[in-house]
Amino acid sequence: MSLGFRAVQWNRAKLVYDGVLIAGVVLFLAVFVAIHTRLHPPQGAADLIDVWIRACGTCAFVMLTVILAIGPLARLDRRFLPLLYNRRHFGVMTFGVAAVHAWLMVQWFIADGSLANLPGELTTWADYGKFIGFPFKTLGLAALLVLFLMAATSHDFWLAFLSPPMWKALHMMLYLAYGLVVMHVSLGIMQGEYTVLIPLMLIAGFGTVAGLHLVAGWRERNADRGGALGGDGWIAVGAPDTIPDRAARIVAAPGGERIAVFRDGDQIGALTNLCAHQNGPLGEGRIVDGCVTCPWHGYQYRLADGCAPPPFTERLVTYRVRVNGGVVEVDPRPLPPGTHAAITVSRKTS
Amino acid sequence: MTRSHRFAHRLIWPALAIVVALGFTMALALRPPPEPPPAAQGTKP
C-alpha cells in the first residue's frame, strides 16, 4: 500500500491493555445489570432490554470520561502516561459499547411493538424548537456519528494520510461528542427519572474532565511564552548541567512553538518538541538506547540529526545549539529536518 | 501538541464548560415535577 502503510504492531503491553479494558467493560455491565434487575425486576422483554440500554449507555459515558481525562492527567503527572499508550483502542471500544446502546434502543422499540414511532420521534421538526422536549435521541446519534468517525480514522494509516496536525484537529471533535452525550442524558432519561445518581454522574464526569483540561492548560500557559532572547536572537537555556542527563529542557521559540534541548552525557542537541507520529511532547521523553524516545508511543530519533534509526524514515526539525559564556543557547530558527546540529561540550564549560 | 492545538484546547474547554453547565442546569431546573403516586383505591364491597 501507499503512504507508508504499516500493519498494527501488537505487543504484550497492548494485549494487556486491551485485556484489562475488555475485562473492565464486562465487569461493569454485569454488575450494573445485576444491581438494576435486583432493585427493579424487569416485567418483560422490553424491560430487560431497557436495563441493558442503561448499562451500555452508562458504561460508554464512563469510558468517554476516562478517555478525555487521560490526556490532561498525563500532562500533569507522568505516572498516567501508560494509559495514553493505547488510548485509541479505548476509543474504538467506547464506540462499540455506544453502538450496542443504540442497537438495543431499536430492539426495545421492536419488543414494545412501536418501531413505527421511532422515525416520527426524530422527525417531529416542531420539537427541535423546544428545550425540554428536544429530540434527545438526535443528540445521542450525533455523538455516535462522531465516535464512529474517530474509530474509523484511528489507525496509523489515517494518521499518515491526514498528517498528525490534521488528524489531531479531527479527533478534537471528541470534546463536542462529550458535550452532546451530557445533553443527551440531561434532556433524555434525566427528564423522567428523579434519582439523584444521574445528575451526580454528569456533574462528576463532566466537571472532572473540564476541570482537568482547564488546570492542565493553565499550568502550561507560562511554558508557551518565548524564552529570553539574546542580542542575536538565540535563546538562553541554562548551564549544561541544568539540563538533566538523558532528558531535556523545553524552551519556547518566539512564536510559541516548543523546542526540546536534550543532553546525553557531553552531547547536547535541540529538536522540535513534536514527535513525527502523533505530535507527542518529545521533550517530556528520555534518551533510551542512545535515542530520544517519545513518551507517548516510544518513537525514537537520533539526538545528533533528528533522524529515526534505520529502517525507519521519520526525520525531525533540528535547531543549532552553542555554549556561550557557560550557558547553552539555541537558535530558534529551525533547520531542515534531519540536519546534524548537536554539539559536544567539554565538562569544563559547564 | 502544536501551539495551535494548545490554543484551541484553551479556547474550547472554557466555552464547552460554560455551554454544557448552562444546558445541564436548565435541563435540571425546567424538568417537569414527578407525577404524584396514584391514590390508593378502596376495594368495593
Image (cartoon, grey):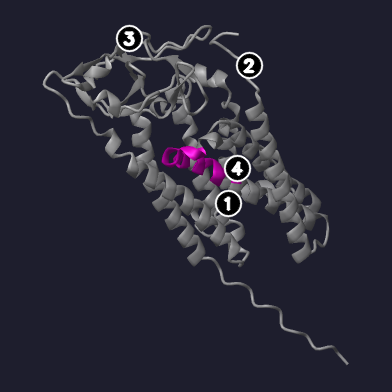
| Circle on res. A141 | 4
Please identify the quadrant where the N terminus of chain A is shown: top right
Which residue shows up at 78% across the image and 85% down it? B41
Q: Which of the 4 quarters of the picture holds residue A286?
A: top left
- Pointer 4 local density, CA inside 10 Å: few below 14, some 14–19, many at least 20: some
Co-location on one chain, circles 2 and 1: yes
Query: Of callouts 2 and 4, which one flags the residue occurring earlier in the amino acid sequence?
Result: 2
Q: Which residue is mark 2?
A: A7
- Using the rendered image of the protein, determine whether residue A123 is visible from the camera's viewpoint: no
- Mark-to-mark CA distance, 2 and 1: 39 Å
Q: Residue A136: which numbered mark, if any? A: 1
Write down the region rendered in magenta: A63-80
- Image coordinates for residue A190, horizontal then vertical, percent: 58, 61
From the image, tell me which residue sits under label 3.
A336
Q: Check whether the beta carbons of the residues at disc 2 and disc 4 lie within 8 A of each other.
A: no
Residue A341 visible in this rendered orientation of the protein: yes
Q: Which of A52 and A122 lies nearest the eye of the viewer?
A: A52
